[in-house]
Amino acid sequence: MKNKTILVTGGAGFIGSNLCEALLEKNYQVRCLDNFATGKKENIAPFLEHPDFILIEGDIRDLETCQHACKGVDFVLHQAALGSVPRSINDPLTSNEVNVNGFLNMLKAAGDQQVQRFVYAASSSTYGDSTVLPKVEENIGNPLSPYAVTKLVNEIYAQVFNRVYGLNTIGLRYFNVFGRRQDPNGAYAAVIPKFTMQLMNHESPVINGDGNYSRDFTYIDNVVQMNLRAIESDNPHALNQVYNTAVGDRTTIAEMAEMIKKYLSAYDPKIAEVEITYGPVRNGDIPHSLASIDKARRLLNYEPTHVFSEGLKEAVTWYWEHLRDITSN
């Protein structure tokens, strides 16, 4: 793997920037492609002067940009997408343009430029209305949101590009990823950074529903490990598959909120007194999410380094150290 060049699309985003950092630490040549629609320059600021890092500012909806970014690349880690179920419900057209048309552009460019392996961010939303737990890769339900449709289409396109064009792909179905650099602001902020910021401000977080919905929350370090396993594996049976990228455990939303309160209260005792409130169930939400990670263990030698409580404690510490100066306190 020495001297290999890796392209990270969406490399200025939450997951992408953590991947760029890990790849540079392993002495890869790293290219970052981002249009900064949701990614942030500050996420990659520490890498801009690194001799093995190149930033390409561009949009995956432009095929020429994708071709340029893929030229001379050995592996692609495709993270660029418009996330969020509510965003896709409010604006299905843009979600489709980025997540489907942009994905197809990247597949085409990777194939044309003879990229060795195309690893992409899939989603647990693909399981849709399936009530079977734990979620096993081969058994999915019907999509519950436009976002879920786009991620299912990605998997189908990846399979077709392997069969028709011989492009090797690996899909990683992310389960509720959280951790350092995840944006706590905006209408579509993920629940953990959003609740953390609200509690730091002594504001009451609002849980959608009764709090008993559960998630297989997955710390960023586990996701980084899966991506590295996907590009570094020499197991031919590991290729052209999709894998759950998770911990294999679940926590209710109410439990998660109470844990954030507990960890933050160590820094600010007043947070323990902040009330957690409840609102209506959010349209498109899956009630329960729990992954089987047996396939990833078997074919990619994946083993999570962080269970939820460990990852959450690290994440809360990161937010306290980096974001308390921009809260209202």
Image (spheres, helix red, strand yellow):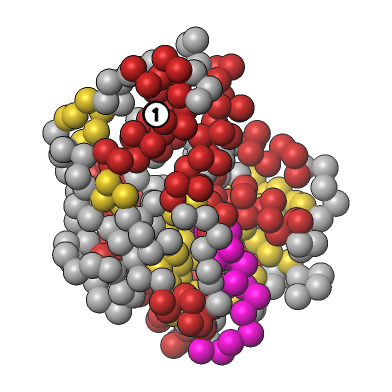
Kindly give the residue lying farthest to the right in the view shown: 51
Report if residue 328 is visible in the image.
Answer: yes
* 64, above or below 252, in the image: below
The residue type indicated by label 1 comes to Lys
Percent position of residue 2, x then y: 81, 73
Picture quarter with the N terminus:
bottom right
Magenta span contains residue 225: yes
Counting other residues with Cα less than 10 Å from the Cα at mark 1, is it few (<14), some (14-19), or many (20 or more)? many
Name above or below for residue 173 compared with residue 157: above
Give coordinates of residue 64: x percent, y percent.
59, 59
* Residue shown at the point (55%, 77%) measured from the top left: 301
How far across and how far down the image is residue 67, in percent?
A: 62, 64
Residue 151 is left or right of residue 104, and the answer is left
Residue drawn at x 49%, y 10% is: 329
Q: Secondary structure at mark 1?
A: helix
Q: Taken as a whole, is the magenta stretch helix, strand or loop?
A: helix
Left or right of residue 189, residue 11 in this image: right
Count numbered badges in the picture. 1
Q: Is residue 288 left or right of residue 94?
A: left
Image-based side of 9 in relation to 72, left or right:
left
Residue in front for this viewpoint, 138 or 317: 317
Residue 77 image position (x, y, % from top left): 58, 63
Residue lying at the far top in this picture: please name it: 329
Quickly name the residue at label 1.
261
Q: Residue at x 62, y 50 (%)?
A: 18
Taking the spot 49% from the left edge, 18% from the top edge, the residue there is: 268
- Say if residue 157 shows up in the picture: no
Say whether residue 150 is magenta. Answer: no
In the picture shown, does residue 178 fall above or below 113? Answer: above
Magenta part of the protein: which range? 223-237
